[in-house]
């Protein structure tokens, strides 16, 4: 009776099939994206692979263009705020604050912003930072098979979104900050609700860390993957959690303090290896530090009849909405602010804040009219995207999932 090999192959002489032979290898080009579940946004990666091993990657952004910089040239200074929301749409309040600070610097009113307004800005910024990190960590865990941490963290994110909606009136794209302060004060009892939610979020974090920190599958997929050295991170200009995971001790809130951050105590967590697992740990610790900041703000928040949420200057501040609807003077003032714009003296200014993903900067050139002549944004996602090709070199195709997830590229901020 013929053996199985002879029957299947239809050949009598199959002796050579038993001998090990080195098969010729050929590189293959494959596409990931533009719409891919692991991309956290629309971006195309053209991979050159040798089997499962990545030889080269061509990163191609530009599929989700917000036109922020060009649109800002045709909008008044107040009308730009909704555009900033759509940059990093996971932590839009920080975008609002960074842009407002640039306009205030041009106006020369940086030191005139009411202290309560400064505290409110920091509060909503830190809440936004927490929502950003919850989204990044939760989504990255889900992409590696950890669906429960994703549900837990998105539940916690939703608690904060509800609170931000109470403040601004919008769940996601808030347009809450204004030149000179914020659009309206915190609702009565809002801080108590926030503090209660922070306690619940801390409990959720204990559960998630228990599930992930020493989980063998999670550790194997994250530790040692996407390693970036401190020297390379500096040369690429990496900041935020990605840069700090490489050991770069740089946080705008500490190194170039703004608003009321000099009055607050918090630590800057640093990694040592610069891999995906360190990026995860840094983000988790930053959530804890943001909670620490928020509790300090709750104790120190200025109160009283003399405390304002926006500067008392009709040339800069919009009138209260109730007045705009009921008095002709306020209606005209509102109309002039929106249609003609705040008259900003000619000049240029650059301000930068600590965004959810790193140093977020706004460079504005003013020509004396009510509209920016030029408004450029230094978006950390765009800077970090340039490092992905080097980061994923010689890794497996499956490793792109945690690498890209922990870079946390936000499409709207990258394609600005």
Image (tube, helix red, strand yellow):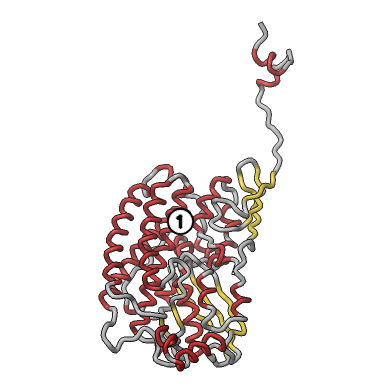
Of 149 and 178, the residue lying toward us: 178
Residue at image position (50%, 59%) is: 408
The N terminus lies in which quarter of the figure? top right
Q: Is residue 180 above or below residue 186?
A: below
Question: In the displayed structure, does residue 303 sit left or right of residue 90?
Answer: left
Q: Is residue 22 above or below residue 265?
A: above
Q: In the picture, residue 326 is in which quadrant?
A: bottom left
Relative height, residue 151 to residue 415 (above, below): above
Residue 372 shown left or right of residue 356 in the figure: right
The one nearer the camera, 41 or 395, is 41
**Which residue appears at 56% of the width and 89% of the height?**
340
Outermost residue toward the top in this view: 1
User: Can the viewer see residue 315 in this picture?
Assistant: yes
Q: Nearer the viewer, residue 161 or 139?
A: 161
Rendered location of residue 220, percent (x, y): 45, 44
Query: Could you say whether the residue bearing mark 1 is in a helix, strand or loop?
Result: loop
Dot 1: few (<14), some (14–19), or many (≥20) neighbours within 10 Å?
many
Q: Which x, y percent locates residue 29? A: 69, 47
Residue at the (58%, 57%) spot, across then down: 388
In the shown orientation, is residue 24 left or right of residue 296?
A: right
**370 over 416 or under it: above or below:** below
Which residue is label 1 attached to? 273
Please state, as top left, top right, bottom left or bottom right, where the C terminus lies in the image: bottom right
At which x and y percent is residue 177? 44, 78
Residue 236 visible in the current orientation: no
* Residue for point 40% across, 74% down: 254
């Amino acid at each position: 009776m013929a053996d199985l090999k002879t029957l299947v192959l239809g050949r009598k002489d199959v002796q050579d099939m038993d001998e090990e032979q080195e098969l010729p290898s050929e590189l293959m080009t494959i596409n990931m994206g533009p719409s891919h579940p692991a991309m956290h946004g629309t971006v195309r990666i053209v991979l050159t692979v040798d089997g499962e091993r990545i030889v080269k990657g061509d990163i191609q952004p530009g599929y989700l263009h917000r036109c922020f910089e060009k649109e800002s040239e045709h909008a008044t200074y107040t009308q730009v705020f909704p555009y900033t929301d759509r940059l990093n749409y996971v932590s839009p309040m920080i975008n609002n604050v960074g842009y407002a600070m640039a306009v205030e610097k041009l106006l020369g009113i940086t030191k005139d912003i009411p202290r309560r307004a400064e505290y409110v800005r920091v509060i909503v910024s830190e809440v936004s930072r927490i929502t950003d990190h919850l989204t990044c960590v939760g989504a990255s865990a889900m992409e590696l098979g950890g669906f429960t941490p994703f549900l837990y963290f998105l539940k916690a994110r939703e608690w904060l979104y509800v609170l931000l909606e109470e403040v601004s009136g919008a769940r996601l794209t808030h347009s809450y900050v204004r030149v000179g302060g914020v659009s309206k004060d915190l609702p009565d009892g809002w801080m108590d609700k926030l503090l209660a939610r922070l306690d619940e979020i801390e409990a959720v974090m204990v559960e998630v860390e228990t599930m992930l920190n020493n989980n063998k599958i999670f550790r194997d997929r994250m530790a040692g993957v996407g390693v970036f050295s401190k020297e390379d991170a500096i040369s690429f200009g990496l900041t935020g959690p990605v840069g700090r995971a490489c050991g770069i001790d740089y946080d705008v809130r500490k190194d170039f303090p703004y608003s009321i951050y000099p009055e607050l105590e918090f630590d800057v967590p640093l990694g040592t290896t610069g891999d995906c697992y360190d990026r995860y740990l840094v983000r988790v610790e930053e959530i804890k530090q943001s909670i620490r900041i928020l509790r300090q703000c709750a104790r120190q928040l200025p109160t009283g009849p003399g405390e304002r949420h926006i500067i008392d200057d009709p040339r800069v501040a919009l009138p209260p909405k109730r007045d705009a609807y009921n008095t002709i003077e306020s209606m005209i003032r509102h109309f002039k602010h929106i249609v003609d714009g705040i008259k900003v003296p000619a000049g240029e200014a650059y301000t930068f804040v600590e965004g959810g993903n790193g140093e977020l900067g706004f460079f504005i050139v003013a020509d004396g009219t009510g509209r920016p002549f030029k408004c450029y944004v230094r978006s950390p996602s765009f800077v970090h995207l340039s490092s992905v090709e080097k980061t994923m070199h010689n890794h497996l195709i499956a490793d792109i999932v945690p690498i890209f997830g922990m870079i946390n590229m936000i499409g709207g901020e990258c394609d600005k």
